[in-house]
Image (cartoon, rainbow, N blue to C red):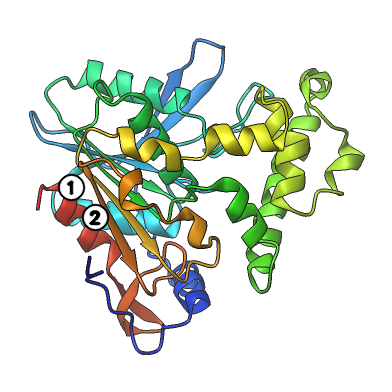
Amino acid sequence: MSSGFTPAWWAKSPHTQTIIPLLTQPKPIPLKQQRLETDDGDFIDLEWLATPTANKPIVLILHGLEGSARSHYAKRLLLDCQKQNISAVVHHHRNCSLEPNRLARSYHSGDTQDLAFTIANLNARFPNNPILAVGYSLGANVLVKYLGERPHNSGIKRAVAVSAPLQLSACAKRLEKGFSKVYQSYLIKQLQQRVRQKLAQPHLVDKMPLSLQQVDQLKTFYQFDDQVTAPLHGFKDVHDYYQQASGLPYLKSIEIPTLVLHAQDDPFMNQDVIPTRAQLSQQVQYQLCSHGGHVGFIEGGKPWAPKFFLERRILHFLKGS
């Protein structure tokens, strides 16, 4: 289908599309925090834009790797929701909110249990408010997998997945090449720091799968997922993790209206994330743009004041248009 997106003349490079949004972030919006205590003795933190109005939709935002309510894409969507008087809430993956979580386990690209817990809480608390979900990057993969696992009882009415790494092994390989290694290095350093924080807590040292000295040796996502993500979350190895957690096989099972939005020049991915028509259910609308980078999609403005396609497209779809 036609992408409907034309990049700004100065932002045709995938790296400009990916980096400029980070450098031109809006100021944070005041949010109200809510903590959900989980059955395993840990917690999930939510941050609310506004208290839901009776019978009105709630936009549920799932951030990407090492993201939060303070990520540029989350802030931009929250701002647009605020302007349109739409209630919104950010679900934080464990260890991504303002306070470190209690347990050794963290989060990963296929972790749908915590999302299910949050949605069950929202549905119980606001039974007459439709949940409209938006996932970015890692959060988009989690969302796709969740919807495919629960085609008839997801608790979500409509969904959008942006820049989803639907084939994890391919994305890990892509991030080891060319300029994409810069993004990998940036994120790996953040992940290493998360592990160091865990190892600094005496009661968690024996529960972690590696030592403090080994953390510095992790230079790629493949290494990190093999030595940390997989053993920490019950996978046999990195290959088992990538196979089980990738969202691509779940697209054909989704039974609610869902938009999957990719850029063909995304520096985090390659052609392996692009589904065939046979891999999509009738409810999935796939939109592939020639440009856009990773969670970028700058369509106008100036480099110091860009204008974005994403928020308009997301809310247009979520409203049923």
Vertical side of 140 occupied by 116: above or below:
above
- From the top left corner, tell me how far across and down residue 85 is, in percent: 13, 48
Q: Which mark is residue 78?
A: none
Q: Are marks 1 and 2 in contact (CB under 8 Å)?
A: yes
Q: Secondary structure at mark 1?
A: helix
- Residue at the limit of the structure toward the front, as seen here: 278
Judge the density around disc 1: few (<14), some (14-19), many (≥20) Cα neighbours within 10 Å.
Answer: many
Nearest the eye: 55 or 147: 147
Picture coordinates of residue 234 (x, y %)? 66, 22
Image height check: is 110 above or below 223? above
Q: Residue at x 14, y 28 (%)?
A: 129
x%, y% of residue 113? 46, 22
Camera-nearest residue between 18 and 56: 18
221 lies left or right of 159: right
Vertical comparison of 121 with 1: above or below: above
Disc 1 marks a residue whose amino acid type is Leu
Front-most of residues 225 and 23: 225
Q: Which residue is mark 2?
A: 314
The reply to whether residue 140 is visible in this rendering is: yes
Q: Which residue is mark 1?
A: 318
Quadrant location of the N terminus in the rendered image: bottom left
Which residue corresponds to the image point at 41% horizontal and 34% vertical from the top-left? 145
